[in-house]
Image: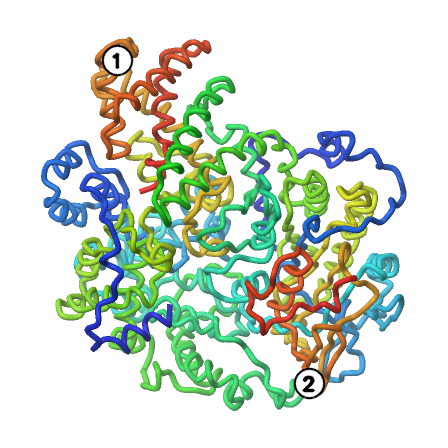
Amino acid sequence: MKRSRHVPPASGTSLSRRRLVGLLPASIFAGLGLSRLARADVGANDRKFLFVFAQGGWDPTWVFAPEFDNSSVDMPTDDSQSVTQGGLTWVSSTTRPSVDAFLTTYANRTCIVNGMEVRSIAHERCRRLLFTGGSSADINDFPTRIAMGAPSHLALGNVVFSGPSYADSTASGVVRIGENGQLGTLIDGSCAGTGLRVPSTVIASLEDAYVLARAQKAASIAGRGAEARIAAAYTSALIDTPTVTSMADLLQVNADDPLDQLLAAATLLASGAARCVTVADLGVDNVTWDHHSEITRQGTSFELLFERLITLMQTLDSTPGAAGGTLADEVTVVVCSEMGRYPQLNTSMGKDHWTTTSLMLLGGGIRGGQVIGGYDANMGGVPVIPATGESDPDGVAGGVVLQPAHLGATLLALAGLDPAEAFGDEVEPVLGAIST
Amino acid sequence: MRTVAVALLLTACDPTEPPVASTLVPLDGPRLARRMSIDLRGVLPTTAELDEVEAHPENIHALAETWMADARFEERMVQIYQERWRTSIDEFRGTIYDYGLSEDESYAFNRSVGEEPLRVVAHVVATDRSFADVVTADWTMANPLLGSIWPIGYPAGADGWQLSRYTDHRPAAGVLAVNGLWWRYISPIFNENRARAAAIFDLLVCSDVLSRPVVLSTGLSISDSSTTDAIQSEPTCLACHASIEPVAATLFGFVPLDDQSALEMETYHPERENLGSSKLGVEPAWMGHPVAGLAELGAAIADDPRFIDCAVQTATEGLLRRSTGAEDVVLLRDAREPFVNNGLHLKDVIRLVVQSDAYTAGGFTDDATTETVDHEATRRMLVANQLRTIDADLADLHWDSRGYDQLDNDFIGFRVLGGSVDGVTLTAPQRTPGLTWSLTVQRAGEVSAGRIVDRDLADGATPSLLVGATSATVPADAEFSTAVAAAWWRLLAQRPSDDDIAGLAALWQSVVDAGGSATDAWTTVVAVLLRDPDFVSY
């Protein structure tokens, strides 16, 4: 196991979520304590997204793919068995009680997608493919697209607490917290370090006002193209800075604690300042899910992940949303990993990379209680009819093997954006995954 | 990348000139000098240089020649190639703990490893060697740290990055035979060097095989067909692997028996070279041409026209600060010609690009098309690694914390937050400002401003930026206007108007009125200039 690389932000320790909750206007949390608030109709414009990324490549056969009848697949050798309940079928084990608890409790809000072809087996490439639908460096990832497509300007847009983030050269709405939360040190000035100084609040306000005026002047006289883009975006960033500064505590997370980040994400989404948040989950060792040896670590990693997801869902359920219901109604949670793992064990009792994987959609906007797609005998993806989500194993009814672009199209549709603008007409959103 | 390279070959005989040039308006001399100086040596022009191009704009290219001979040019090549090769990452499998180094040496360790291949390219370019040396040289670049931990014969008594040689009998193959490249582009042992072969295609011939979709044939059975069998027989696999496997077969001298062992990874293993054929079932080759090993692979790559095209494309994109496309075919072709004809000196490409309409453009004529307006980078944004060298030059400041350069790491610093490439999640420099970039610019400007003012206004100092000012100078003094005008000229390459100077005088006074000291007021004046839209873009 690698040594932990966490260094606490210089400005101090992370705040507890309870304390963060206290930082938001009391009206937002007026309903706290209610076990379940009334469901609300949430328009696409109000839809928010939380991406939970299991970094390193998970093995779907530990939860999502009960391929016990496929002799070519090495399934877990503990007491794992296939369970069907609430429209979901999964791999159950007494060693993973949180998986069972989650899928039992939240079955009606959970949609499992099996057999998605990522189309690569290289980590970096798979991550880019999974988050953007393509392999080019000049494509915005789904969170960035969704944030930039928000009906009104958001100070934070797309916040990346941890995990991948891909933005093209024109994307300005991505707010990365930094590997150890160093954004906070930029905000509070503690980044200056020994022997260097930053201005007092009073002087800083004079400085900021001058710079903003200069930027606005530059924007007003800028020509076309890059000059105008840079001036306008700089002005926008300067205008947003006070808002972000006032929310600095919301952006302070424990870099080594995915649960802390998930709960911070919920708080941030509740605040309305961000539309998308990404959080990485690094598995049982808090390093990676890339288990080329000791594949049993997948089981423990899934158990921990679902334990966190239970806490997340409880938080979303008990947090009032902006549209009258709960935050759970408004937030679509995407739980995914960049690749699957080869169906058979290697000599180190681990599993190598595989192009096909599973993911889970849950929460707001998702038609739960269903498994979309599946795996064929060779652990390739079974074609799916996007409009219905039904499988089309022989491909005779227009079914397609799902790819990350289909995921992206589905999320854009949920966000009220036109998937065709991003992926063309040939990539249909999986409407079968979306609740009506 | 691949598209442009192919287009370049296809249109090599097409004399048609695209109409783009006629709709571009060039920068004025001082602003162009500022752009060139930043791109070629990573710092602003001196006041004297700005004065010269203001008086004699035609001298700009003579200055560019001077700047390409500057020692800092080599550093810029490191930065430009980092944006493309992405080797300078924050964490490698081998760590400081493997070598008994301290935590404070972590940044230096990771940068030394990651920059090794970049330094080889930069040295080839800066010293006018043939670009073929990049893949054929029998030397590497090392610093004392690498010299102390790896089997490298670092020159005794030397300092900094020096041309050095490995002592473990590895082949002469330029960057193909340096640890830094293969520590960055690792192949898991099961992967048999295929990932590394893909990196060779991507970095050296701009052919991104990993962008090609992996399509599983329905005829492929996981039950009766090993991966190797499929790769050698399945048409959908062969499309890529027919090229990849023979290259991967040349790299087995870099395969460790234990990929957690730094000692195994740092050492070349000649005795394992022949494992490639047996492990992969193919003979080493480059695009169908058999090669005997890594050295011949390097030579074969150097002879591949795509290697030339890729070098031209990489340098051009690094200078234009944007991707190249079909609109740039003529420029790429023109830049290729002297490169090929004069011994593969990349400076010939750079020289031609910085004189091109696309590079010098600062605006558009009214009849420029939307496509042209969207494509051309008539204004570029300074990103973290550029701010780092500019501010260091202006303020004699290396902004670091616990041994980490704050504008060049993502562990506790602001490289990605400031728009620079980390090589993993940000693979092209940010080109439009965002919130974290703005904050990075702000803090970098503020700490630099403090240092500049402390230095310039110290008793008995001769100010280098605030020319003529002293700690007693106030806005009512003529020296105030002189100092502010000098700073404005140096930092923005523009002459300030009276209103501009009056604005800074008012800011200075408002700081004092708010209870700040004269030092605070001067620091604020310099800080706002270092955050000015015309400073942070170029």
In the rendered image, which quarter contains the C terminus of chain A? bottom right
In the rendered image, which quarter contains the N terminus of chain A? bottom right
Farthest residue toward the front? B367
* Left or right of residue B114, residue B173 in this image: left
Is A378 located above or below residue B188 in the figure? below
Q: Is residue B158 visible?
A: no
The numbered mark at residue B509 is none
Q: Position of residue A401 (x, y in %)?
A: 65, 77
The numbered mark at residue B470 is 1
Q: Position of residue A300 (x, y in %)?
A: 75, 59
**Picture quarter containing residue A248?**
top right
For the residue pair B116 and A246, the one nearer the viewer reads as A246
* Left or right of residue A297, residue A166 in this image: left
Q: Is residue B50 visible?
A: yes
Chain to which mark 1 belongs: B
Mark 1, mark 2: which one is toward the viewer? 2
Rate crowding at label 2 as few (under 14), some (14 to 19) or many (20 or more) other CA atoms within 10 Å: some
Q: Position of residue A435 (x, y in %)?
A: 78, 62
